[in-house]
Amino acid sequence: MARAGTNLRTNYVEANEVLRRPYQRVLIVIVLAGALLLPAASSTYFVHLLDLCLLSAIGALGLMLLTGYCGQISLGHAAFLAVGAFTTVILTVHVGAPFVVVLPAAALSGALLGFIVGLPSLRFRGVYLAISTLAMHYAIIYLATSYQAKFGSSATAGITIPDPSIGPLVLAGDHAWYYFLLVLTALITAGCVNLVRTRPGRAWMAIRDRDIAAQALGINLARYKLLAFMASSSLASLSGSLLAYYSNVVTVEKYTLDLAVIYVAMIIVGGMGSILGALLGAIFITLLPFGIDSLFGYLPRAWRFGSTLFGVQVGAVGVCIIAFLLFEPKGLAEIWRRIETYFDRWPFRYRPLETARR
Amino acid sequence: MEFAATVVILTCTYALLAAGIVILYKAGRVVNFAHGELAIVGGYVFYSSGLMAGGMSVWLAIAGALVFSVVMGVVIYMAMMRRLVGEPFYVAILVTVGLGIVLKSAILVIWRAERLTIDVGVAPAIRLAGGASLSYMDVASVALTIAFFAGLYLFFSFTRLGIQFRGTAENALLASQRGVNVNFVLSLAWVIAIMAASLSGVLFGGRAFLSTESVTIGLAGLTAALVGGLDSLRGAVAGAFIVACAQYLTVRLIDPVLSEAVPFLLLLLVMSIRPWGLFGTLEELDRV
Amino acid sequence: MTGNILEVRQLEVVYHRVATAIQGVSLDVPTGSIVALVGTNGAGKTTTLRAISGFLPSEDANITDGEITFRGRRINGRMPHELARAGIILVPERDKVFATLDIKENLEFASREGGQITLDRILSYFPRLAERQTQLAGYLSGGEKQMLAIGMALLCGPSLLLIDELSLGLAPIVIKELMERLRRVTKELGLTVLLVEQNANAALAISDFGYVMEGGRVVFSGNAMELMSHPDVREFYLGGSAQAKAKSYRDIKQYRRKRRWWG
């Protein structure tokens, strides 16, 4: 009985389908149900970790759209997180705006700055673009630092903001946040999946693969590149704003170049060019330091203190980047695809052409 | 006078970094984002090796730094960069970013992120007009930088290996067919670049300090290389001078906090006017 | 040394693990001779040269069947610089000189200490190069670039010279001059040459033997003189016969008879 594999799409309708096969729909239901039930079976600490994962997932999705799908290298992601956080601060402290206003406002300010940061991409590619995003990063952080110096309670302690509330409900506590973030992330993921399987996504992928050819096909490079930057930065700002509310404090010291690199690590480890990859990468990289921390629990106490633990946590991210790029460039998403394909084709195996060994 | 002294030392520091970046770009089309980390770790290695026999021995320190450069260069090229031939350009860049992180973690784990100043124990300084002073180490550093660049120039222009280097940089495939061991040449490129970076790290460690924050000199060196032209060694020197001046003036006259941002803003300016850098070749441009 | 310096038997090369470029290709290259390998675009000539000189991996291709023997030793899959040291030198189709180095540096690049052939001797073969030694190779004319490429190749001390598309982009008179000089130099130095050419006329004119490739296989072989006068070869590759109507090669009885599926 002939049956097409999971990845074989033979017409446009099929190419646009998100969940083609019954098992995929069942899987999604199981994952969502599991996600909803998870807090009941875990400690508050673990729920806190999950919250962090969801928060970084939103940011990672943004970077995936820009770098994974559109191919524009950006090292300025930390700056956009900062933009979201500081917009939140300004609006809550000076204007007293409510949560439901601040969130969209943060996304909007992110989009606006994304437009500006994206302008060099119309002139530069590759390394030069990466450097120009770096320049923007420093410029934005400089502004944020000046703001914090002027308005912060002390120069480094940062600025505190109260818990957000929607009407009479206050969003506080890891569990409440978990459900809120779960729903929000699910919606954003669905939005991203739709974005990449429709025109913007295809235009981005064309630009990523060969922008000159894309232009020759009539794709307006300026419009789609800027769209990618704006989508990416608005998601990042949203994430930054949520994180600000979640941790109730905002300090500019958090938003370093290393943070931008950590987000890049997320999309590399997850697998560039895949929404699932953004989610997997975000979870992996967010949980990595905590995993190392628990591993260190098995080692002599002395090792846990000082900078050794911190050093290893930092180094692990670097090792992951290098290891994935060298050995599994398509990331965790590819590993998942291989598992899927194995079960899909079972009991057949696909054997590539072997070279003769004599 | 102090302006001149500081700028000269800073130029030497950045020029060495930029030279390494240019060599790596010409040899393998790789933009090395880990250059600052390599420089600082080289500085740490210099310091630690010097102290190995009790008391500070400059010879041990130099030997240690040389061994570090050779080992790192060979390992980085053979284990990592060589496997990335044919991949899109950003893969190599991201691998160097990862490498930078690993090196930074080495500073944290091995040296506990101690702030170190390298002091070879030669204290008396030369007093100059205008109240500035140069230590012997400063003078030695400038002399070494000049010697390094002179050596590079002689090497590339007149020795057979140097000519093979330049040919391999242009067309590794053809070089391989004419009997050149491309792996050897490219590893050598990395070794030379890391030696220059280590020297720069030692310079910086002597004048300022070594720590996990000092790695940002790598970005300044990168922008110096870009301003001068990513494929030009004389551009590296010119770019380094311009960046050093701009930084010094900004810190003195405008706002010290901006010192990290200055190289980038300068680069944006240069890129809008002359994107291929002051001395770069047009074909090396990778922009729309 | 008599006999064949190079023997290729039943060579099969696959690109990207899916596309077979050549299949069942067998060649003999007698020592000291000039052998021409002609055919149209896409026949597999360059692939054959790449297989012999070790350049397949850089194109994501592999030898999946067959043997290549050089001086009696099997050389399948060896590294390019090893083969270069052993005496197999390839002059590639494109990027055959270092454009950013000048002529003298290009030649110095290739020369070896105590090599049989000295730089001065090469310059005496190609006086045009001797005249302008400090000119950057990127600014030379097509014919001069070819001369420089051949000069560089000779300085490596080859025993087997593989030349890919010598005549590409050159005027007919330049081609003629170049081919004749090549023949003179290689015969004088006792070298063996395997010449891949689309310009079958020019190639067969200076060669001793010839092979014709089509669609990844060898379809004709023989003495260069015989090939040049063979009616089918003349019609398809040398451009000229009494009945000048273009036909598909499949129609030719001769081809059908000679089509090899075995041996």
Image (spheres, rainbow, N blue to C red):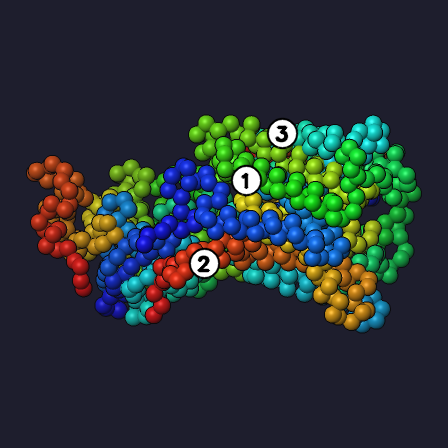
Label ID, residue A343: 2
Q: Is residue C200 above or below residue B114?
A: above
Image point (46%, 63%), residue name: C113
Find residue C119 and report its horizontal and vertical position in percent. 42, 55
Label ID, residue A119: 3
One can see residue A127 in this view: no
Density class for disc 1 (Cα within 10 Å; few <14, some 14-19, many ≥20) is some
The part of the image, by quadrant, that contains residue C189 is bottom left
Residues at marks 3 and 1 on the same chain: yes
Image point (39%, 62%), residue name: A347
Chain where mark 2 sits? A
Density class for disc 3 (Cα within 10 Å; few <14, some 14-19, many ≥20) is some
Q: CA distance from mark 2 to mark 3?
A: 45 Å
Q: Quadrant of the N terminus of chain A?
A: bottom left
Residues at marks 1 and 2 on the same chain: yes
Position of residue A293 in the picture relative to residue A2 (left or right): right
The part of the image, by quadrant, that contains residue C175 is top left
